[in-house]
Amino acid sequence: MKKLMIFLTAILLLTSGIAQGASAMTIDETWALVREAYIYSFPLVLMDATLRVGTNIEEPLNGKAPINQAGHARTLATAKFRQVVTPNVDTLYTQIFYDLSEDALVIKKPAADRFLNFQVMDAWSDTVAILGTGADTQDERIYLLTGPDFEDEVPEGMTRVEIPTAIGWILGRTVCYGPDDLENIYDIQSQMDVRTLSLWLSGEEQPKGTYMPENDGTPIQMAITMGPKAFFDRVNELLVQNPGYPEDAPVLEALSAIGVGPGLTFDPSILGEDAVERWKAMLSGLTAELTESSGQFLVNNGSFRFMGEPISRFGQEYDYRALVAIGGFGANPVDVAVYMKTGFDDAHEALNADNEYILHFEPDALPPHEENGFWSITAYGDDDFLIDNPLDRYSISDRSEFVLNPDGSLDLYLQSDEPAEGAANWLPVGNEGFHLFMRIYLPDTSVLDGSWKAPTLTKR
């Protein structure tokens, strides 16, 4: 925050000087603003790209659905799933991409005998609400999502959820207990209902969506491969109906000096003759720079660390918001789930499938969680996607049939080939570099305050 305020003070003085006829910005000063504009707005552009890919279909199928409709995943994510980086294989997703610019959206969430909730994110990837506690045995609930311009009455029996932006993303997560449990989840999904308020009241059929070939692709790649003009043109268009928060006003005032803001025009000629090279250089080092500037939010625990608060409720921590968008878009707040990551063993050497590893849990030290919570260990390649393997096994979890040691401890084997001890505790890790995520849903407070110690990861 201190760094942000120093930056804003300097830029506001600069833009004030320009307004008074002072010397124009130097090229380095211009690029400093470009960098901050990119960091500030990247989650908005990524949300737009994710929405365009996720709604690029005529009728709901395989997790996709037209805008303001529900797309239900019917199978757990595999190595072929490329829409979102680091997907989990604990739950079946229900995805809803919404546009509230012309109508409110009704969501009927059924009662369930398991972890089930809906994470409601706005256009900036902030979690506005969690619909459901994660232990949804209560009666069904009907929610009404309303946008910034909604002025109608809320129908009786609906709980209003106010959204500050027009577009956004809702991720429903229903825990799965294995392939034999899928039919039970299908039954829960069939009881969900998502439609605009006008359709809910009229009883009319859902409209068909539209398929456009240019909206096929991987959202993160679509966002990071945009050039400066395309990127900031899209930002300026999106800002009209998806404004920044009131506390963002000083940032947007500063960025207007380079033509970034709602309805403004970005002129790429301000970037100089070597714009292409400088743009590429800026992007190539950005993740490392964001990781360093967000270090105070990264919580270390043994070989693992996780992104702590204010994840998913970012406030003015724009560097952190951009970092999470790049590495784990759609992450939950920590009170719902923590995602503990490691890419190193206990000697701080990078994980590589050329080696064999043991992940060891002491007796009675499996990841602690509240009632109806759960945990898993998932392996990902260096591209942040699931690793293809002949077992189609991407994680080991509290729902797996692993074998404890006689003393109650647990050893998980992370390697390319099946270990001599057998496949029950084996997590395949491919043939190249990889990293792990340990997810704990509804984590116990001992996870959040660090009194529970994460397991060690050592070479065999």
Image (cartoon, grey):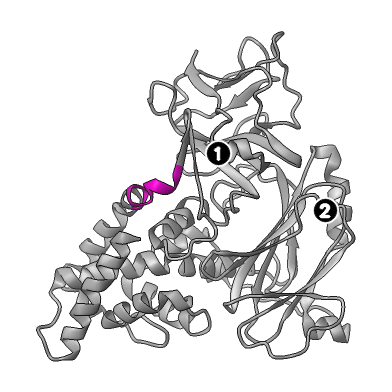
Asked if the magenta segment contains residue 372, the reply would be no
Q: Which residue is mark 2?
A: 136
* Residues rendered magenta in the picture: 290-298
In the image, residue 5 above or below residue 304: below
In the image, residue 25 above or below residue 118: below
Q: Residues within 10 Å of mark 2 (few under 14, many from 20)?
A: many
Quarter of the picture holding the N terminus: bottom left
Front residue (pair 446, 38): 446
Question: Which callout, 2 or 1, points at the residue further toward the start of the chain?
Answer: 2
Q: Position of residue 88 (x, y in %)?
A: 63, 44
Image position of 32 (left or right of 84): left
Q: Quadrant of residue 250?
A: bottom left
Front residue (pair 376, 8): 8
Q: What amino acid is labelled 2 in the image?
A: Asp
Q: Position of residue 338 (x, y in %)?
A: 59, 44
Image position of 415 (left or right of 393): left
Name the residue: 67% across, 46% down.
77
Q: Which residue is mark 1?
A: 449
Image position of 46 (left or right of 136): left
Residues tagged 2 and 1 counted as in contact (Cβ below 8 A)? no
Name the residue: 39% across, 79% down.
249
In the image, residue 437 above or below residue 54: above
Q: What amino acid is labelled 1 in the image?
A: Asp
In the image, residue 78 above or below residue 301: below
Q: Position of residue 19 (x, y in %)?
A: 19, 90
Q: Position of residue 331 (x, y in %)?
A: 57, 53
Image position of 67 (left or right of 154): left
Q: Residues within 10 Å of mark 1 (few under 14, many from 20)?
A: few
Confirm whether residue 41 shows in the render.
Answer: yes
Name the residue: 83% across, 83% down.
155
**Which residue reaches farthest left?**
23
